[in-house]
Image (cartoon, grey):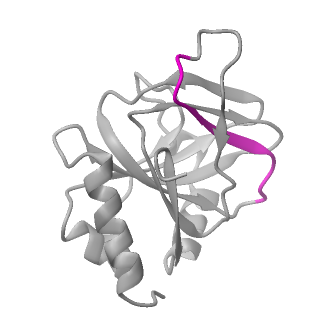
């Protein structure tokens, strides 16, 4: 479903480092910034350069990265990102529960509309078109995501998709 998201075949080589950061961070370390109000952990982004794929990607595109923690029984309503063109996300494998990341190409204010769901595989990278309507619903356990944002003044989703596909096909990562 390239219009909304692209699932790479690239497994993260820094997953375990990020997982440990999530587990060991105190509750006070997780900030709840406005406007998104989702607990956010900022970290030294040089960690990302230890991953060959991310290192090469970040040499081509300027990014801003965070870790998000969505608490149980929380939803993040339908929206289009204002500050980011698109993101590369990775679900971090910390006692994974049930959660949904949904997209639609219709205004979600109407009664019935098509939805498209990402079936995240932990530790793998996904490119998301955050300029399309999307929503997140987390049910029973905290959900941890590495989110590498391509900011508003950066390349648009279709251009980033070409870069990610080119890098994905270039060689085997990890």
Q: Is residue 44 visible?
A: no
- Residue 92 as seen in the image, left or right of residue 85: right
Residue 75's place in the image compared with 61, above or below, is above
Count of marks placed on residues: 0
Query: Is 99 colored magenta in this rendering?
Result: yes
Q: Residue at x 25, y 55 (%)?
A: 159
Residue 32 placement (x, y as % from top left):
48, 30
Residue 74 placement (x, y as % from top left):
70, 28
Residue 63's place in the image compared with 72, above or below, is below
Q: Is residue 116 visible?
A: yes
The quarter holding residue 111 reads: top right
Residue numbers of the magenta segment: 95-107
Q: Residue at x 18, y 67 (%)?
A: 60
Residue 66 placement (x, y as % from top left):
41, 50
Q: Residue at x 42, y 27 (%)?
A: 80
- Residue toward you, 13 or 159: 159
Query: Is 133 colored magenta in this rendering?
Result: no
- Residue 110 as seen in the image, left or right of residue 83: right
Q: Residue at x 52, y 42 (%)?
A: 30
- Residue toward you, 50 or 173: 173
């Amino acid at each position: 479903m390239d219009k909304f998201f692209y699932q790479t075949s690239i497994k993260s080589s820094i997953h375990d480092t990020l997982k440990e950061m999530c587990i060991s961070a105190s509750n006070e370390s997780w900030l709840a910034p406005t406007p998104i109000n989702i607990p956010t952990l900022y970290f030294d982004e040089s960690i990302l350069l230890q991953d060959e794929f991310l290192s090469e990607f970040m040499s081509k595109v300027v990014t801003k990265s965070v870790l998000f923690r969505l608490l149980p029984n929380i939803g993040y309503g339908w929206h289009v990102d204002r500050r980011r063109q698109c993101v590369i996300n990775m679900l971090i494998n910390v006692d994974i529960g049930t959660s949904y990341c949904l997209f639609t190409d219709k205004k979600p204010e109407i009664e019935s509309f098509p939805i498209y769901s990402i079936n995240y595989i932990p530790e793998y990278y996904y490119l998301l078109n955050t300029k399309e309507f999307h929503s997140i619903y987390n049910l029973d356990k905290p959900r941890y995501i590495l989110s590498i944002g391509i900011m508003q003044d950066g390349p648009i989703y279709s251009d980033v998709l070409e870069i990610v596909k080119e890098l994905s096909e270039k060689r085997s990562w990890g």
